Amino acid sequence: MTIKRSDWPRALATQSTKQLTAVLDEMTAHWTITPVQLPQTGLGMLQLRDSAFNDPYFLGEIPLASAWVSIRTEDQQEYQGAAQLMDDDQDKIEALAVADAILAHQLPGWLALYQLVEIGMTKLTTEQNLRSAMLEKTRVDFALLNAAENDDD
């Protein structure tokens, strides 16, 4: 199963920061990692559009973290990676940006990291299936309610 690059941060975010950094520290021990842009954590405004008039409005604030890094390997090759996630953990977002560079450019050790992505996607799929099952249990068939109201006449 091929997992899209846009899903990598979400899948890897299911792993603890400690576990993720332990895997990355081993891979990047002899590489130089520098930020292209300083990592940022904070709040972002969630903007939506009104369905009737297409006017923008702000629904509220969400936690948002982003990082963009450059990796220089032992052979002096340079690769970049970035990540953005609805979270406020600076260490995790930096690790996700490094993981993005490793996975995108298939640097040494990328397969071990991709296994963590697959594990994370399995976990996310399981959670989504559970949520869908819970939502299905709350579904109401309004046609049956209408028929019951007509029986009282």
Image: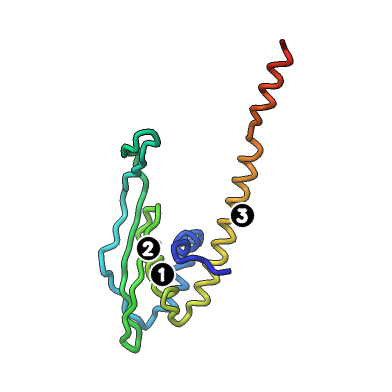
Q: Residues within 10 Å of mark 2 (few under 14, many from 20)?
A: many
For label 3, the residue is: 126
Q: In the rendered view, would you say 68 is above or below 53?
A: below
Q: Secondary structure at mark 2?
A: strand
Q: Residue at the location (32% across, 44% down)?
A: 45
Q: In the rendered view, would you say 46 is above or below 104?
A: above
* Alpha carbon distance from label 2 to label 1: 7 Å
Q: In the rendered view, would you say 48 is above or below 9?
A: above
Residue 133, quarter of the rendered image: top right
Mark carried by residue 113: none
* Alpha carbon distance from label 3 to label 2: 23 Å
The foreground one among 69 and 138 is: 138
Residue 63 placement (x, y as % from top left): 36, 49
Q: Residue at the location (64% across, 27% down)?
A: 142
Q: Residues within 10 Å of mark 1 (few under 14, many from 20)?
A: many
Mark 1 / mark 3, whichever is N-terminal: 1
Q: Residue at the location (35% across, 87% down)?
A: 74
Mark carried by residue 83: 2
Instruction: Farthest residue to the front: give it.
Output: 53
Tell me: 147 left or right of 80: right
Q: Secondary structure at mark 1?
A: helix
**Cβ atoms under marks 2 and 1 closer than 8 Å:** yes
Q: Secondary structure at mark 3?
A: helix
Instruction: Farthest residue to the bottom: give it.
Output: 75
Q: Residues within 10 Å of mark 3 (few under 14, many from 20)?
A: few
Instruction: Farthest residue to the left: give it.
Output: 37
Tell me: 77 left or right of 21: left
Kind of residue at badge 3: Thr
Mark carried by residue 100: 1
